[in-house]
Amino acid sequence: EDQVTQSPEALRLQEGESSSLNCSYTVSGLRGLFWYRQDPGKGPEFLFTLYSAGEEKEKERLKATLTKKESFLHITAPKPEDSATYLCAVQEREDYKLSFGAGTTVTVRA
Amino acid sequence: KAGVTQTPRYLIKTRGQQVTLSCSPISGHRSVSWYQQTPGQGLQFLFEYFSETQRNKGNFPGRFSGRQFSNSRSEMNVSTLELGDSALYLCASSLGLAGNTIYFGEGSWLTVV
């Protein structure tokens, strides 16, 4: 069964203090690894899909990278509006469902 | 373009009742999946539909069911509600089964009392 583990559970950052979130996964064959951002009371907002080791994608202050066992979401010079829960999910090659990690809650203080 | 639309946004039901939640996918998207989100279990897959056929089902009891219509709109139903069914129910859509991007709606908040 797919396993997705995110760390840390919570991250408190000062505005401008860059950091990284980790998503480690165990899957028999990876079709794609997804990153989402979720604000309280709202649905997950799509950020990135990564497909193969070595792939990187960027969006504003966020950069996602992928290896064969884990993915990192780097937040560069974060702002308070980057405060949210960041969710990682894997989609297996033989199964189209998303298996989610528990998320990392990021709080950025001004 | 319009995103994934879910109705109702909030509802309160009594134990033993049933509930139907509705989802309209992004225009052109043919795959619709449903997830349950709770503080304790996180996001868990319920089922996925493509071209009106259920393609995959998660580990939920038979009280949870769904369907997809010819216009790709989907509904999920929960019968004989239990307190533990209180959750945020999320619908997601993508172009196909192996969607490159899977977009979520804002969810339906169900409280069972």
Image: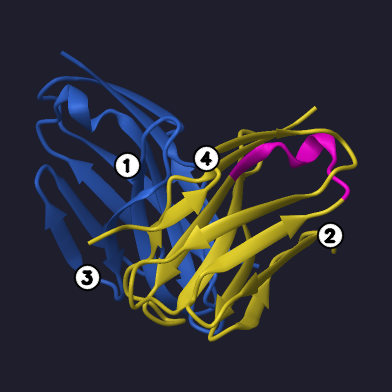
Chain colours: A blue, B yellow
Quadrant of the rendered image containing residue A57 = bottom left
In the rendered image, which residue does mark 3 sit on?
A54
Count residues near mark 4 (Cα–Cα under 10 Å), then give few for <14, some for 14-19, many for 20+. Answer: some
Q: Chain of mark 2?
A: B
In the rendered image, which residue does mark 1 sit on?
A21
User: Is label 3 in contact with label 2 (beta carbons under 8 Å)?
Assistant: no
Q: Are marks 1 and 3 on the same chain?
A: yes
Q: Position of residue A41 (x, y in %)?
A: 45, 32
Task: In the rendered view, tell whether residue A53 sits above or below residue A16.
Answer: below
Image quarter where the C terminus of chain B lies is top right
Task: In the rendered view, tell whether residue A4 sits above or below residue A38.
Answer: below
Q: Could you tell me the amino acid type at mark 4?
A: Arg
In the rendered image, which residue does mark 4 sit on?
B9
At 70% across and 66% down in the image, what residue appears?
B58
Image quarter where the N terminus of chain B lies is bottom left
Q: Position of residue A75 (x, y in %)?
A: 18, 39
**Alpha carbon distance from label 1 to label 4:** 31 Å
